[in-house]
Amino acid sequence: MEAYLRQWQQQCLDRQQWDAAIYVGDKLLALTNSDEDAYALAKIHFTASNYTRALSLVSRSDLLQRSAAAKYLAAHCHVKQNKHDEALELLGEKNPVHLVTQTDSARRKLQYMSNGLSSKQLGKSKLPSRVERADRSEERDHENASNIKFEAGMCYLRGLCYAKQNAFDRAKDCYKSAVRIDIQCFEAFDQLMKNSLMSPGEEWDFVDSLNFDSILADPGGVNTASEAADFTRNLYLTRLSKYSRPEEFKKAIETLSTHYHLDTNPDILLAEAEILYTNSRSAQSLAITSSILELDPYNFACLPLHLALLHSLGHTNALFALSHDLADTHPHEPCSWLAVGTYYLNTGRIPEARSYFSKASLMDPHFGPAWIGFAHTFAAEGEGDQAIAAYSTAARLFQGTHLPQLFLGMQEIALGHLTVAREYLTTAYNLCDRDPLLINELGVIAYLEDDFASAANSFKLALSISADNDAPPSQTSSTRLNLAHALRRSGRFPESLEHFDEVVRLGLRDVGVFAAKGLVLLEMDQAFEATVALHEALAISPQDPVASELLTRALGLLETVGVLTEVQEEGVNVGLERTLGEVRRGKMPRRRRMEGEGEGMDLDGAWDGGGR
């Protein structure tokens, strides 16, 4: 009868008929009264979201003390019910660090086991500071393989509880211990990456410290285990920050795409889109995220990046359609209201955008994009103090990313607090030293402090990094313009003029650009060329006072300076004499209309002022 009931129960599970499986499992447990059947029935209740009933089943007798699996399931039930204090009380605050493996599995190191705290926290903690010495490798060998995975899972749950208490340092330690104990505990690794709990350098150091050789592959020899280790490491590399060690990242992507044919996998495509976005290649990145969402319209891992790209490229209609769809189909997802807020921000309806970003952050207080968007709405309205408060919250929640610190620095620059801005930007630089926008902002501070040589060096470094990233030149026009101004203030006028010309060539036709170019030309005693540049400035903004004043000065210089050189004047005289001779011989009409580029020129070749 037991075999019959187990078969019946499994058939129900295969059809996702949870109530039927619970009904049959209850009869099976009544027949056997075994711990295994109690645990199996508790798992079905957990799958059916009956967390209280699952907890009561695994709490029978002393099952929690005898079974790591039951203890993990009970703690998970508490977490699902948002009873994080109860879960932490059940789990305890000590991580089983004696189960951690080293990258060199042959070495036997004596390691310390503490209360799951860092050395600084250990000194401040009121918990017993019991320190034991243990041989990790030998103790791990004595553990059952499945128990090791459940111990790693309990470290992950412990991290979730600490994160809910805003104890992010302790949560990070728990997540790291979980992955070190069980390399395949991806949930913990995912929490570390998506919440930016480590800086780019720390992420790479952490992955380098992992012992991927501890992965137990299917029977097939050493080669199979080695291949599984390399495959898993490459997968994890695609989740790391794209600002550090790009060569290894590209190598991992290439291996997964060609050797394992994962080139169309959404996670691999998303990693490629992220590196393109990091390199300011927004159009190519958007093409990839769009292809991902065509196959999986509700891929919530991809949506924040896709929304950022739509906003940066000004695709308002696409934002409207996407946000409307998400709000209808997934109203309980924070990303849905992030999409709505992004649409309103893109259309300039700031109060509405702020309300929806706030709604997303309330649904998930650890949702980084919502906090950044919320802060952007204050910055857009010039509310500096409130923007700084919101960016500061994001910086506290996401300590491993440099973006909140960068935005804080930019906001302080706008308020004129250069010393505070430099502190924020220096902190961001210590987290990530390869972001062109960050280096550009450091150059802006140097410029405002009249340190033009340092400013020019920063702008050049930003342009160099952008070139290394194959960023399109149009994305660097603002930095190049800043460089041109820094060179102008340094008195390096020929170099400055080259960069102003390049900025114009890239399509930045602004009155300020042409006015600055005219000023450089005046400093180089090229009054006629300055006049031309200043006329272009006034053609864009006829009432601009700076361009008007500079033009007056340039025209004053032209009164005492010949427009044409002696050679040019001789050429014009020869041309006029030839034309006059042809007219006298009757070969040409006496008058002709000047066409093409000669429009607006008198016969002596002088410019008539363009009709101004």
Image (tube, helix red, strand yellow):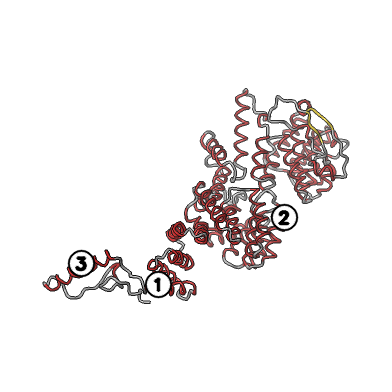
* CA distance for labels 3 and 2: 80 Å
Is residue 221 something that shows in the picture?
yes
| Residue 175 versus residue 499 in the image, above or below | above
**Which residue does the numbered mark 1 point to in the structure image?**
557
User: Which amino acid type corresponds to the residue marked 2 in the rendered image?
Assistant: Pro
Residue that lies at the very extreme toward the left in this rendered image:
585
Label located before the other in sequence (3 or 2)? 2
Is residue 404 something that shows in the picture?
no
**How packed is label 1: few (under 14 Cα within 10 Å), some, or many (20 or more)?**
some
**Which residue does the numbered mark 3 point to in the structure image?**
574
| Residue at point 17%, 68% (across, down) | 578
Q: Between tags 1 and 3, which lies in front?
A: 1
| Quadrant assignment for the C terminus | bottom left
Q: Nearer the viewer, residue 96 or 247?
A: 247
Q: Which of 540 and 449 is in front in this view?
A: 449
Q: Between tags 1 and 2, which lies in front?
A: 1
Residue 611 x/y as whole percent? 35, 76
Label located before the other in sequence (1 or 2)? 2
**How packed is label 2: few (under 14 Cα within 10 Å), some, or many (20 or more)?**
some
| Residue at point 43%, 75% (across, down) | 552
* CA distance for labels 1 and 2: 64 Å
Q: Between tags 3 and 2, which lies in front?
A: 3
In the picture, measured across the screen, residue 420 lies left or right of residue 482, that is: right
Label located before the other in sequence (1 or 3)? 1
* CA distance for labels 1 and 3: 28 Å
In the picture, measured across the screen, residue 264 lies left or right of residue 366, that is: left
Residue at disc 3, secondary structure: helix
Q: Nearer the viewer, residue 446 or 326?
A: 446
**Which residue does the numbered mark 2 point to in the structure image?**
365
